[in-house]
Amino acid sequence: MQEALLALTKYWTDRGCMMVQPFNTEVGAGTLNPATVLRVLGPEPWRVAYVEPSVRPDDARYGQNPNRLQTHTQFQVILKPDPGNPQELYLGSLKALGIDVEANDVRFVEDNWASPALGAWGLGWEVWLNGLEITQFTYFQQAGGMTLDPVSVEITYGVERIMMALQGVDHFKDIAYAPGISYGEAFGQAEYEMSRYYLDDADVATNRRLFEDYAAEAERQLEQRLPVPAHYFVLKCSHTFNVLDSRGAVSTTERAKAFGRMRGLARRVAKLWAERREELGHPLGLAELPAATALPSTLPTTDEPATLLFEIGTEELPAAEVTKTAEAVRQSITTRLGGTRLEHGEVRAHATPRRVVITVDAVAPREADAEKTVKGPRASAAFDADGNPTKAAQGFARGQGIDPSELQKIDVNGVEHVGVIKTEIGRTAVEVLSEQLAQVVGELRADKNMRWNDPKLSFTRPVRWLVALLGDVEIPVAVSSLASGRETRVHRTAAAPTVRVPGADGYLDFLAQHGIVADPVARREQIVAAAAELAASVDGVVEGEDALLEEITNLVEQPNALLGSFEESYLELPSEILTTVMRKHQRYLPVRAADGSLRPKFVAVANGDCDPDVVRAGNEAVLRARYEDAAFFWRADLEVSPQDMKAGLDKLAFEERLGSMADRAKRIAGIALALGAELSTEDGETLARAAELAKFDLASQMVVELTSLAGVMAREYALRAGETPAVATALFEMELPRTAGGTLPSTVPGAVLSLADRLDLLVGLFGVGANPTGSSDPFGLRRAALGAIGVLRGIPALNGVKLGAALELAAEQFRAQGVDIPEQALTDAREFVLRRFELHLIDAGNPHQFVGAVLPLADSPAAADRSLAELTRRAGDASFGELVAALQRVRRIVPADTAPSLNTEHLKEPAERAVLDALDDARDALPAEAPLSVFVDVAEVLTAPINTFFDDVMVMAEDPDVRAARLGLLASISDFAGRQLDWQALGTELTPTR
Amino acid sequence: MQEALLALTKYWTDRGCMMVQPFNTEVGAGTLNPATVLRVLGPEPWRVAYVEPSVRPDDARYGQNPNRLQTHTQFQVILKPDPGNPQELYLGSLKALGIDVEANDVRFVEDNWASPALGAWGLGWEVWLNGLEITQFTYFQQAGGMTLDPVSVEITYGVERIMMALQGVDHFKDIAYAPGISYGEAFGQAEYEMSRYYLDDADVATNRRLFEDYAAEAERQLEQRLPVPAHYFVLKCSHTFNVLDSRGAVSTTERAKAFGRMRGLARRVAKLWAERREELGHPLGLAELPAATALPSTLPTTDEPATLLFEIGTEELPAAEVTKTAEAVRQSITTRLGGTRLEHGEVRAHATPRRVVITVDAVAPREADAEKTVKGPRASAAFDADGNPTKAAQGFARGQGIDPSELQKIDVNGVEHVGVIKTEIGRTAVEVLSEQLAQVVGELRADKNMRWNDPKLSFTRPVRWLVALLGDVEIPVAVSSLASGRETRVHRTAAAPTVRVPGADGYLDFLAQHGIVADPVARREQIVAAAAELAASVDGVVEGEDALLEEITNLVEQPNALLGSFEESYLELPSEILTTVMRKHQRYLPVRAADGSLRPKFVAVANGDCDPDVVRAGNEAVLRARYEDAAFFWRADLEVSPQDMKAGLDKLAFEERLGSMADRAKRIAGIALALGAELSTEDGETLARAAELAKFDLASQMVVELTSLAGVMAREYALRAGETPAVATALFEMELPRTAGGTLPSTVPGAVLSLADRLDLLVGLFGVGANPTGSSDPFGLRRAALGAIGVLRGIPALNGVKLGAALELAAEQFRAQGVDIPEQALTDAREFVLRRFELHLIDAGNPHQFVGAVLPLADSPAAADRSLAELTRRAGDASFGELVAALQRVRRIVPADTAPSLNTEHLKEPAERAVLDALDDARDALPAEAPLSVFVDVAEVLTAPINTFFDDVMVMAEDPDVRAARLGLLASISDFAGRQLDWQALGTELTPTR
């Protein structure tokens, strides 16, 4: 291992990095070394490389876990500014480590890094070596709450992992550290003893005192304007906090307080450091970014319609952005070309993680010419009495570059003006495209955007090259520091990673010759086919993995599917664990037998050519390590009863102002018991027990590690602890639905808990003002709202639950815990849920008028559903249409504040009597709580009398009493019908056209 | 600089060292990293190399001092066990750093390392590169209070210093750290800010609390038997203590307490670590040391007398041991050969730092044969009545391997025995020498001894080779793992560092051909001559540097004197500073002008051939840096008034139980004022002021750095602060005499202070039982005793001071400070001083009888001196001899407890009367306090009457009254004379032979 550290040091120092030493106080990561976290601030250049033994008390395992250490070795590199080719430099470092990057599958998989405690974030990747995460690669965007300019590239190697992979060992202790000495021999005792300290023996009172002392000392040094010692003490705070945490001594409140304090200090340190560097005149100078490129003074031209090829070359895009970006670019180009007079054929987009390829058929060589009329002064003001041009006309003519004699008379909305009709000569295609394509690149945006070494551009990952060809003519495109060309980049491991593109036509085939499948549809088909074939070879199938397939498709440029195996013994673990690990961590496709059971196999999809045996072995080793971890958690968790485990919820933070996860579980139980007050004895007992254990598995090691297994593990652990299957199921189902439209609970106790869970979330976060804003929804309130709606609609036993009342129940639980929930928050929460419901119904294809009409009922979503169904059923029904029209007519004429009344004294006209009688009949015929279908059947008797009434009677009679009586009658009808629907919202959708 | 760190790492890892990281909590030195201080314990092998940024708050200088940093970079290597050639390996590492070890002067200069706080020590060297200390090289003997077995070699490079030398820069900030980035640019801000923290801004209360918390946590981890986390907290304690210290917040008591606590913890950590490693079964295995060598089964022989050459090859001996070792080996061989029957000529010894060369002329080829009589049973018991041998005789014969018939009769003290006379055949010279020389090596010892990789040997530095030749025949000598041969080692930088020795004759010439001057006398002459010549070339001389010349002679094998220069501007500093730096730090010979003033020149003596320009430039740079430091201190000190500086004595430890240096200064002042109560007004005023400032310069930066300048700096600073020259002189003189026999104070105030200083030291340390034992005299009490005697004898104004009374004065000062001084301690202290006086007088050549005779007067050493002088003067004087004999005769017969009495009633005999009258006359004639000369003149009247009395009178008369009267008379004489001398002690030295 030490050779590896030396090789990396040599590699990076040869590339201009300064070598520094690990920091001499405990740090959790190399990032915290001032050589990173302070030096990335400000405008000075900085290149540094160092080893950093990173101390993570929470990862202490007494040296027993093969992959976890309380101190692991990071190798950290900072390149400031981004050198423009950091990925290529990084791959070079892997070669320096002796890794054959051609034989192995090295990939950059989206991983964004954020440390709220440091006020820091960046975008980048985890680098995979045959599925093993060996490096964190980040474009550092912010630190200490300050936006970084220039941006730094941070490369953090996980050295033990790399060594385990390179040396093919299964336990860190077996790494050959130095000739003749293993990692375990060198560091095993310290690993054990420091684990003991962190997990068992650190004195809590002492460490609490240390935390306070360190924080106070940091404060003092900040006051003295000394960021360096202040930073030391912030780090000491942080380490001490981690010690307390690993000792299980940090309550939720303490955690929040401590984080707040550390964050505040870290920000002040950063700010002060930046100020001090400025005061010192930036001793290292100012970093320089690439200069802007310029277009050539003359542009080439074309003669014939030709294909446009425009490729935007990027570093690996997040899988989810690949398709979106392709579509956005396609639309942008389509729109922009639409704004020109350049004729063209179809616009097509294809994309891989590293490129968006746009082709446009038959782009004309130039725009058509166009006439353009320029309006001058009114004719009457353009010539004086003698017919000579006035000063105004002369001025206009001069402005247009013509002689006044050339002014023409033109008609502008019937008024005669002078003016000029000019012919606008169409620009060449190259000129148009050069301008438009540049703007397309400049306007690229994704959900999360970042900056790199370009002075102006911003996108989800760096844009590194552009290819723009019209036929075989290069279109010069200049965007900030980027200039287009005809060189594209293929696999980084290719003999020639950069190749010249002959022309726009047949570009996808050209790429294919270089092993790149640019068409996502083709890539996906290749993957599906290969996976099926591989699975079939072991009597298995790959099924139901659409989302994963979508992701995998956008993780590679050239799919290379491999079949891997794992030890059958792991099949003893619950299959959800196995598949979660495969999907979530590794993006492997699980292979199942015909009966749906898991086979000890998986399909991994590598990128491009590589040595299949090497890559397979690597992927298998990663999975084995992951499963070993999972098995470790599984066994450890099984030794703790659900009750005991639940006690651990005290230590899990939920939201600072809303207490711990234990508080939340208690509230959920309270809500559930209130909602389920009238359940059957059996369901009631199940609910009571499940409510008692609610969320206990969140404190299990497995769920702490794999949060998506919440509920799954509750079920498994509950069953094994002797709980009834019904209780186990309820605990599982309380986490359902997991996604919008996901499976709903199937049992009543499960449904009640699920609803209670979501109500608690909604009320709590609205209660503290943590409403979702824009695209930010960190607590998943949108999903919670839809989940609540889903349960209310989908579980018959809960159809009767009213949303408003249920939210109020939840609020009571908070209030019982001393958390104030303002009424307005409840109103907002209810409105939020209803809005989600509305959108959901519209997204489901319901006419928005129908949705609007049933919305007043949505406090009981099931009722709204029923009415909506009825509306849909009656949509073509003419008599229903007549009824709607009549009721809308009534509603239109009645002022909103009119009280219903039936003043028979003043309603003497036959038309009035007819309406009165029909209303009486309908009222009598309508059962209480009748659904819309019954109402419509009953209410149809009103249609004719209403229409006759409006034909025969003038509502706004001069006699105020008569007028009042008539309005009262109509208001009574409106009131009677209004309980069913918002009839006005239906608009003319159902109204017969007359 | 980073290339250097990488080069060292590569060099040592290529040689089997494991690379570890710097420790992740602050350490003061690489030694404290557990990779050293714990791993050197126990029997496991360990080879490690690492960088260690070493934090020394006390060295913080805001980055302003060119050579001092609060964090400097060590490169640390541990080789366990000693590989046998660590110096050669080390020189290889210098080559790896690009240092031309042939052109440069690389030397190993004695430097022994001890850390009482760690319970650790070792012997070794500082390695000099052209006079610059670049490395600490230590054979680690003990750590954590545990004796190390095997011994580790510790090599600690001071990287900044090496880089400054290699890059030729004068300030650490100017070191090129990495391409394009200087040390100052990389670390300047941290250096400034951490200096601010350590010197100004660290919160004292917080750090005190941290110290306690860390210590308690260390305790707890020890109780849990976790040495690793315990060690962490000991280190944190230590760093925190250093922070408090640099903030000036540690009182003497606190310091002692803190050190005691840390020492105790460190020892427990070490012990526990060793135990734990044993419990773990010594995971790294057991280190192996070289096996013992064996002698060949047959030894060669010689035919003719031949020269013996025996060379003991060592690593660089301490200069002070070179001559002593040569003499000890010469004596040992002489004695041993004397114990054999091997004829030989003169035994000669020569020595250099790396070898002791013994030659013995004309060693006979074998011992002479010898006859040996073996005594058997008495003849009477050897034969029975029949004349047959008894069983006893048979048994004896059998035991001697002869037939009973061969028994001879022998006379043993007149008794006839049987026996056998055997001829003992002389052994060959080779056999004798092989045995004896081995024992010489096995018994080598010095003042301080150490162990290395040899399983049995012990000496001041490792013995690495032996050459033993008799003529040209090899004498096999086997001592533990060493075997002799005929290969010697010459300069390590020679083309062939190992050469074959042709024969014993002419060996010194042979060595000379290889550039080694083995004869110290010749080396010294070469140095003196070369220095004189070089000095003369700049009109200078080198004078009065005997001790330094002696040392230099034993620092080189081949002197190579060079003349160097320094900037004249430094001559503005007091010359003592300049010469102290030259001598003490650099072993340079100062060059003076004819008037004794310093010239800006020096003579440095390199070892062996080298590039004189390179070596001169290096030595000049070192001196410049040292002078720059000194100038820095000088300027800084001058900004502080003596009074203010004196306040700093509070912070300086003296002896734990005796308070701080401030307490000591206060006591000295008290003693001095008491002693000087009757001085002249002028002297009294001078004394009062000087006593007030006593020792103030110990708190100056200069004296903290160069302790031997104590007194010198007091004088300089006092003068510049406007004190009178008399006060300045007194402050200077209170530190005199600096050595046994050194210059005494010349002024009365100076002498009083000097005496007070020494009295305080003696009384204090005897008071707390810290009496010198064996060769251990850490506080220099022997020197103090001689100093006190010197002042009492040499300064007339103090001649009247009585030692006992003066010690009592000192004790009173302690008691006033609450320190109990037992009466026995005072008695012991007085006895100790008198014993030193006695030895001193004897060493000065006085007959021990004279010395013994005056000893009773020595409470006033000047009086004893006078009497001694009188004795010496009268030595040949017959009448004095008669008086002595008479007085001794009187003293002999009078029992010790006889009271003087003159009972005239019973003293009627003429002889009695004559004595009585003579005594009366003498008493009348003797003035009070008369010196011995007067006494003798007066007392001579007694000689004849006493002799007559003894001739005529029987003292022991039968009448008890008469007897008592006679004894009383004699007792009166004895009493009268006994106040002058211990006459008995004179023995027969002066008594006429009769």
Image: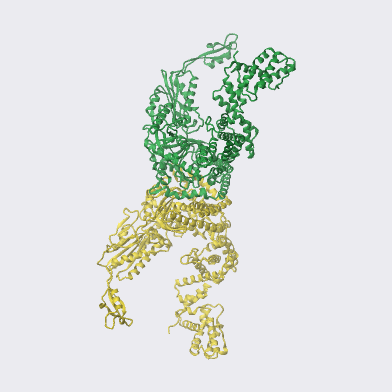
Chain colours: A green, B yellow
**Residue B259 in the image: above or below residue A645:** below
Q: Residue at x 30, y 57 (%)?
A: B499
**Residue A719 in the image: above or below residue B151:** above
Instruction: Tell me where residue A180 appears, x and y as whole percent.
Output: 38, 49
Count of numbered circles in the view: 0
Looking at the image, which is closer to me, A983 or A473? A983
Residue A977, picture quadrant: top right
* Residue located farthest toward the top when viewing the structure as drawn: A386
Residue A379, picture quadrant: top right
Instruction: Tell me where residue A624 appears, x and y as whole percent.
Output: 43, 40
* Residue located farthest toward the bottom when viewing the structure as drawn: B909
Q: From the image, which quarter does the C terminus of chain A lie in?
A: top right
Q: Residue at x 33, y 71 (%)?
A: B339
Looking at the image, which is closer to me, A750 or B835? A750
Residue A911, picture quadrant: top right
**Residue A849 in the image: above or below residue A181:** above
Looking at the image, which is closer to me, A568 or A512? A568
Please indicate whether residue A819 sits to the left or right of residue A73 in the image.
Answer: right
Q: Is residue A731 visible?
A: yes
Q: From the image, which quarter does the N terminus of chain A lie in?
A: top left
Q: Is residue B566 visible?
A: no
Instruction: Tell me where residue B33 appears, x and y as whole percent.
Output: 46, 51
Please indicate whether residue B79 sits to the left or right of residue B728 in the image.
Answer: left
Instruction: Tell me where residue B300 appears, x and y as whole percent.
Output: 26, 64
